[in-house]
Amino acid sequence: MDLLDIMTNLREKLDSLTKAFGVQHGEVISLVGAGGKTTLMFALARELTLHEGVVVTTTTTKIFPPSSSDTSYVLVSEDENEIRDFILRKGYEYGHITVVSEKVNSSGKLKGINVEQVKMLRELGVVTFIIIEADGAARRPLKAPDTDYEPVIPQDTTLVIPVVGIDVLGCELNEEHVFRSEIAAKLAALTRGAMGQLNVGEENYLKALQNAVRYEAGLARQGLAGQSRRDLALPGQPGQRSHP
């Protein structure tokens, strides 16, 4: 069973991802961590396009080009006026638009927008939801962030969802499975290559939050079907959190 099938089963069990994560009208959602952020971003977007208004997906890092089933339109532009005008003219027609600044030829990835442009998007009256992939993990199922410069969470964020791939359970603590495994080892008081209970995400990600925002954690990949919202969590309790 692939991740899309698991997300579909999860929506059937919980009614919707929107309800599972308590998504409210007008949210600016930042996805951080590892193990399925991009898939979750587009799965949420598909649900939210059922509401009135325009859903914008984007990144403050880099993503691989989405497929036509992921998004209705990919707008590649660094020009704020062009982005604004396109969404105002074509937003209702497409319903869901993915906004990036440029294609990186060396990697084939799409470079995202800057954090200030998220504020511009939020101020557009037609945009009702913004979903941002705000972290990179080199396709690993678990990540420990270097909080000197990551994750790249815009200040306008209202909901942060950290994601971890459940398929990391039972794996060795090394770069094959954990992005920034050296940081993870220090946080978990383990040696690299060891196996043990990892609690590497929550406090480091909370340090990166700029405003008081809601913080809902989620697991991705296999084993999600039938879980309750509180079971879809990184170590620690999800819920109302604020940066001290």
Image (spheres, rainbow, N blue to C red):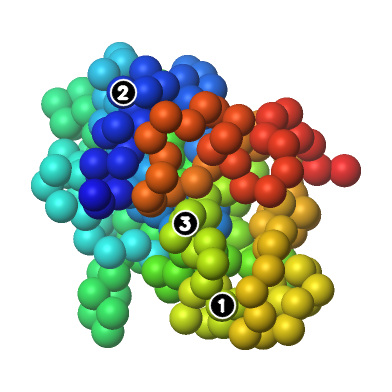
Q: Nearer the viewer, mark 1 or mark 2?
A: 1
Q: Amino acid at mark 1?
A: Glu
Q: Residues within 10 Å of mark 2 (few under 14, many from 20)?
A: few
Determine which residue is flagged by label 2. Answer: 12
Q: Which mark is residue 172?
A: 1
Local secondary structure at mark 2: helix
Report, in whole angstroms, how far the alpha carbon at label 1 lies from the one at label 3: 14 Å
Query: Separation of disc 1 and disc 2 at Cα?
Result: 33 Å
Residue at point 53% right, 82% down?
175
Q: Position of residue 108 (x, y in %)?
A: 23, 74
Disc on the earlier residue, 1 or 3: 3
Q: Is residue 62 left or right of residue 47?
A: right
- Give the image location of residue 181, x and y in percent: 62, 78
Circle 1 crowding by C-alpha within 10 Å: few under 14, some 14–19, many from 20: some
Q: Which residue is mark 3?
A: 165
**Dot 1: what SS?**
loop
Identified by mark 2, the residue type is Glu
Tell me which amino acid carries mark 3: Gly
Q: Could you say which quadrant of the image residue 15 lies in?
A: top left
Secondary element at tag 3: strand
Taking the image as drawn, is residue 136 in sight? Answer: no
Q: Earlier in the sequence, mark 2 or mark 3?
A: 2
**Front-lying residue, 152 or 15:** 15
Q: Nearer the viewer, residue 77 or 167?
A: 167
User: Real-space Cα distance between discs 2 and 3?
Assistant: 20 Å
Picture disc at residue 88: none
Looking at the image, which residue sits at the far right?
244
